[in-house]
Image (tube, coloured by chain):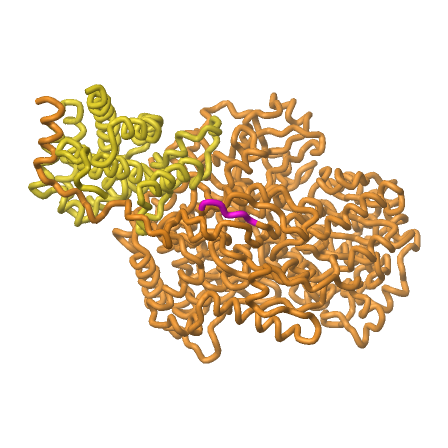
Chain colours: A orange, B yellow
Amino acid sequence: MNRRDFLKGLAATSYVTLSGASVLAPLNALASTGANANDGWLTTGSHFGAFKMKRKNGVIDQVIPFDRDQYPTDMINGIKGLVYNPSRVRYPMVRLDFLLNGHKSDTSQRGDFRFVRVTWDKALSLFKDSLDEVQTKYGPSGLHAGQTGWRATGQLHSCTSHMQRAVGMHGNFIKKIGDYSTGAGQTIMPYVLGSTEVYAQGTSWPLILQESNTIILWSNDPYKNLQVGWNAETHESFAYLAQLKEKVKQGKIRVISIDPVVTKTQKYLGCEQLYVNPQTDVALMLGIAHEMVSQNLHDKSFIEGYSLGFDQFLPYLMGESDGVPKTPEWASKICGVSQEIIRDLAKVMTAGRTQIMMGWCIQRQQHGEQPYWMAAVLATMIGQIGLPGGGISYGHHYSGIGVPSSGAAAPGAFPRNLDEGQKPLFDNNDFKGASSTIPVARWIDAILEPGKTIEANGSKVTYPDIKMMVFSGNNPWNHHQDRNRMKRAFHKLECVVTIDTNWTATCRFSDIVLPACTTFERNDLDVYGSYANRGILAMQKMVEPLYESLSDFEIFTRFATLMGKGEQYTRGMSEFDWLKKLYNDCKADNDGNFAMPDFDTFWQQGYVHFGEGEPWTRHADFRDDPEINPLGTPSGLIEIFSRKIAQFNYDDCPGHPTWIEKTERSHGGPGSDKHPIWLQSCHPDHRLHSQMCESEQYRATYTVQGREPVFLNPLDAKQRGIKDGDIVRVFNDRGQLLAGAVVSNRFPQGIVRIQEGAWYGPVGKDGSKQGGNEIGALCSYGDPNTLTQDIGTSKLAQACSAYTCLVEFERYQGKVPEVSSFSGPIETLI
Amino acid sequence: MSHSNAHDNSINQGRAMVYRLLSALFAKEVDQPLLHELTSAQAQAFLAQLASDPLLGTDVAKINAVLLGLTTDKALLELAADYCGLFLVGTKHSASPYASLYMASNKQDGDEVLLFGEQHQQMLDHLEQSQLQVQSEFPEPADHLAVILAYVAHQANRVNSATQLAFINDYLNSWLATFSDKVGQCDNGQFYTALANLTTHWVKSDCETLAASQSH
């Protein structure tokens, strides 16, 4: 048969091939996805800042900083990579075995990643069926929908609000208290200074620059962390850091970075570093305090007038209560800082105006409450709390804290809770004796040990028996500790639902995965500057939601409609109705104080400016009159000794700041004979937690052989035969990972840094593709939480202790696996 | 669209039918309606005719054997999971069906390019010139293999051989073999490996047909 006859023979069968299912259609000029009609510049924003984006031929072509942003982060280069990322969740997906067997599926397969596509209708009804089953069989204690995180920006589409309102309309569920970033800090500080402090506006930078003689950056790296913000970040803080750099250069302000490593900020400012052994800051602080008392340097009248409990603390400090005077000599042996320097610090800190600026990492360790409390005691002894350029702050590295606020009212948000009078479908509040709220980082404990009762912040918490988890815009397979422990826990869950834009590890360990669109595929608005409230930013949709992704508003409107509660959910308002309402409510709140145009004008212009703010001093009102303006502590004063905490009778958080040894500590501490290296997993320089790790081309600007960098000391590296650029295996008894060596003398011996937010990519123990779902798997990319310890900080906060972690490392000589983190689900079951 | 077009003959009809079938199988999972259609007498006759080409016979037989074995919903779902793992998630450990991932001029070893890029735009231009667009129910970049194959089917009856050949050379031949190898590496079953092979072999022989018709 010749070719012509063969082809004619095909035609002769008259097989009409799926003509109705062609992927092509006649061009419809109006509906064309390639339409150029809307091309041009639009305004939007994100955690990474505000932008102008240019749309060309229907796709995002250029992203440039908003014209008010004088210090944009280079993470702007990763934005397009978030939208057009190859690992987008494109369609609703269900794990195959879950689709076949529902709540009786083989959960040990979770992580073997065999999924199928389903329609939205099917996915949402499976979601609802699962909620029905859990509420019916177990009640609200079987459902945890309270693990929430950094979401994407936008007051209307905030994914946490949508998920919790919609799931809350179905039934009640377990919620969290606290967060991973500041769990210990935000629990201890209300006892000490009367507020969380970590999320409070701080003394304005102009006053600090004017008044401070000395700034102590204690475990604090603002130049790194201020690149991102909770709302669209203005980056105004960087102008003040530039002024500080100049003052350091001129010798007008002395800045001392107390930190085991040379931070990005220290490098930028060109300031001093004081090395301290990891996790020993409390010992150093006690040594300084002892010297202040010994040399009579402390401000006795401030202590007398503004604080409570110094008398109960003093016997401990001087060693009268435990036989161990906390002298500089004593401290030096623990913290590695010489006695002379400790003595000098006591003088320096009390000599002029001293502003102490605490970072957050230091409280993400076992007994993380102590350094925050003890630092407040030091500041009290210095006696400058409430003075401009003096005292202590716990957030100058976060979301523009310290930039003067405009004073304008910020826009509200889509409601997270049910409206008054609304009842959930399953109106059941019987948590069967379990706590309905658990400390944020203890959920894996709860899954593994349901029914167990623990101490937490003066209460008893009884772990619920969690059967189902719902996550939205939240990636606990990044931020929680100890991946192998998480795997064990996830084997116990009956159903896991995740809503996200990209295939995070959390999606991969789920049963139902729903595709949300990115920030740039929906209309929204945001406050410009979380604390500055500099203005209101329009977030104009750049492109329609890609693939079958939907906005959070649309996803949960559909879900609520499935429950017959669509109208209740949206209050009968569309996306734009809501935007107008949020804007107009804000306009009314600001009426007479801040002029705002009508909504249409605002939307067209893309921004409303509220103007600059006035400098302000934290705790000045308290200093002015502590009786009229008391702190929020039980006594209204700074509590150096807390009667309340003492009454809890916790061995790991007594009534005053105390040096307590850790379960793991480097530089001669417990466990260092076996795994001598301290792993520091700080917030990343080029991401917001795990957000933007997926942005391929941007990630390539910092990876080493495609892996997350592990920063190593040159001598440590040399001793192990490691060169810059090698692949390194980092390990301990909890897990193992591969990372790319960056050898740098910014990192002292005995310390490695792997920044958190590195996406988990498990492969077989020996580097083979199969076996990623197994306990002991190797992380192919370098997620530090493969190695970290999943223990509470103390019985007080029960917060995350990621910084109490020892490891060892070696040059990796095994089979080098491909990185599996960014590829969506991969079948790895052996 | 002109049905009196000189290119509209039964030979090109036959060619277009093959391209349409391949496009349909890459466009989505085999579901019950599609399975029903593929196992109908007409379709079976078509597949038998296709299998009569020795170059294509083995793969057509494999595909048909899988189709005829899809007698339970579970079997269909298993095949859908193969499809999902290959074409719907990620790109590194799957065989994403986007030309851009294989063709991008700036692609470096180990790097991935973004979707909706250069090849997507070029395909949009081609479609627009032909008064076509990607169906709204198929929300994929225009450089998806199913779109390219459907466009070749569309061209078969409408433009001359040289134009067709040039398009196939630019948009299929440059990456199809690499794609097919990737499917072979990543496929858990046999169906899509056979389909990718069939596509490669079919396009190769079709190019020969087009080249021969040009020289006439």
Examine the rendered structure and indicate whether residue A249 appears above or below residue A48.
above
Q: Is residue A97 above or below residue A333?
A: below
Q: In x, y percent, where is residue A130?
A: 33, 61
Q: Position of residue A137 (x, y in %)?
A: 33, 66
Residue displayed at 71% across by 38% down? A261
Above or below for A442 versus B12: below
Closer-to-camera residue (B73/A414): A414
- Does residue A504 appear anywhere in the picture? no
Name the side, left or right, on which A258 lies relative to A251.
Answer: left
Residue A164's spot in the image, x, y percent?
46, 65
Question: Is any part of residue A605 visible from this angle?
Answer: yes
Instruction: Please state the total of marks drawn on the protein image.
Output: 0
Image vertical order of residue A673 relative to residue A286, above or below: above
Q: Which residues are magenta?
A: A53-57
Give the camera-side residue of B51 and B124: B124
- Tell which of A419 and A174 is nearer to you: A419
Image quadrant in which the N terminus of chain B is located: top left
Residue lying at 24% horizontally and 45% vertically, measured from the top left:
A22
Q: Quadrant of residue A260?
A: top right
In terms of secondary structure, what is the magenta stretch mainly?
Answer: strand
Q: Position of residue A217 (x, y in %)?
A: 77, 48
Q: Is residue B98 magenta?
A: no
Residue A231, image quadrant: bottom right
Quadrant housing the C terminus of chain B: top left
